[in-house]
Image (cartoon, grey):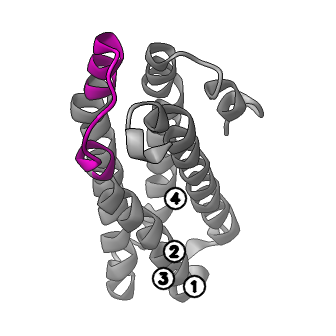
Amino acid sequence: MQKKNIYEDLIWLDEETFISKLFSDIYPEYFNLLTKIREELSPIYNEPFAAITKCIFQKIVFEWDEIYRKEKFFLFPYLVFLKKENKKSESDHAFNFIQPNYKSLVDLLSELKASLTSTKELLSGNYDNILNKIEVFEHNITKLQAIKEDSLYRKYYKLLI
């Protein structure tokens, strides 16, 4: 999905370029991957016992969209402001604002993987492919979150140092 060093490259970027790269390159790939997962899950959506899987996936999309919007319209503009003012945040609120969504997203991905076992036979051989895509998405968001916390947020919240 991602170029091998794209995450490592983020560490060395200035804040504006880091944020720009997220919205121009990385996040569109994440949305694309979620679309592919949805398409591959669609054959089972009409099955009554797959309703849980469908609901979990919809919640995953919701949480990812919440993270995206909170970063784009709240957190990242705040970081740019702090940089321009050459300040650090006195509060952790801005940095913790996204954490419940991120934690929920990771938990939901685990739930989705577990729910897929009950629909494995309905997925017509796509089970391993879908599971792989979910695991790639989970790995990438986890890695990216760690990089954002260590390389981006830490610069602007004095208690994170």
- The answer to whether marks 3 and 4 mark residues whose Cβ atoms lie closer than 8 Å is no
The reply to whether dot 2 and dot 1 touch (C-beta < 8 Å) is: no
- Tally of numbered discs: 4
Three-letter amino acid code at the position of disc 1:
Thr
Which of 54 and 22 lies nearest the eye of the viewer? 22
Residue ID for mark 1: 117
Nearest to the observer: residue 82 or residue 30: 82
Q: Amino acid at mark 3?
A: Ser
| 93 in magenta | yes
Question: Going 33% across and 40% down the picture, which residue do you hit?
Answer: 68
Residue on which disc 4 sits: 40
Decide which of tag 2 and tag 1 comes sooner along the chain.
Answer: 2
Specify whether 79 is left or right of 107: left
Q: Are marks 2 and 4 in contact (CB under 8 Å)?
A: no
What is the distance, in whole Å, between disc 2 and disc 1 at their CAs?
Answer: 12 Å
As measured in the structure, the alpha-carbon distance from the residue carrying label 2 to the one carrying label 3 is 9 Å
Q: Is residue 101 left or right of residue 111?
A: left
Q: Residues within 10 Å of mark 3 (few under 14, many from 20)?
A: some
Q: Residue at x 75, y 30 (%)?
A: 5
Asked whether the residues under the numbered discs 1 and 3 touch, taking CB atoms below 8 Å apart as contact, a structural biologist would say yes
Residue 158, label in figure: none
What secondary structure is the stretch in magenta mostly built from? helix
User: Is 13 above or below relative to 124?
Assistant: above
Q: Which residue is mark 2?
A: 110
Q: What residue is shown with label 3? A: 115
Q: Residue 73: x and y, percent?
A: 22, 30
Q: Considering the numbered disc 1 on the image, is that residue within a helix, a strand or a loop?
A: helix
